[in-house]
Image: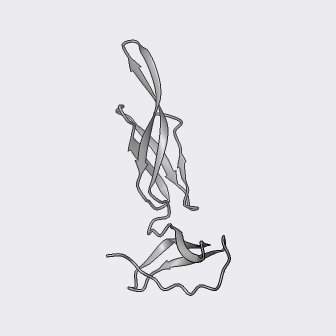
Amino acid sequence: SRLQTLVDVRPGVHGDAIEQPCEFDDGTNFSFGRIKIICANQSWNVKDATCRDTTCPDRRTVVRVNLQGASGAIVGRMPIDLEGAMPGNYSYPCPFESRNITFECTEEGEWDMLDEEC
């Protein structure tokens, strides 16, 4: 089922924006995030919705990976999918390695990588 909310919008011009909390008609409310609505092509449209119940959102990040092979070192980049979380430190496995990499979810809702590379 899709969440719906009634938005009371004013007349606007192309590029006007409205932001509102993540509160929906069925009583569903999210603790974090906003709904952004933009006036474009003579109508209001949802531009972005960041509604979530965690401080830090789900995020895909890319880490540098150093692999040792028979012909020497190979340096590359691999994605790691971070799951939404509350403030604190979280460990994720490094791609192709047996060690972990640590990320911090900050009070401001940002992900910080605490290790430089896998």
In-image side of 108 versus 85 (left or right)? right
Quarter of the figure with the C terminus: top left
Q: Is residue 35 visible?
A: no
**Which residue is painted at 45% across and 68% down in the image?**
52
Q: How are the colours assigned in the image?
A: one colour
Q: Is residue 5 visible?
A: yes
Looking at the picture, how far across and down is residue 2, in whole percent?
A: 36, 75
Looking at the picture, how far across and down is residue 62, in whole percent?
A: 48, 41
> Which of 23 and 86 lies nearest the eye of the viewer?
23
Q: Residue furthest front?
A: 41
Looking at the picture, how far across and down is residue 47, in whole percent?
A: 54, 68
Tally of numbered discs: 0
Is 81 drawn above or below residue 54 in the view shown? above
To which quarter of the image does residue 65 belong? top left
Looking at the picture, how far across and down is residue 18, in whole percent?
A: 61, 76
**Which residue is painted at 44% across and 57% down in the image?**
58
Quarter of the figure with the N terminus: bottom left
To which quarter of the image does residue 67 belong? top left
In-image side of 22 versus 18 (left or right)? left
Q: Residue furthest left?
A: 1
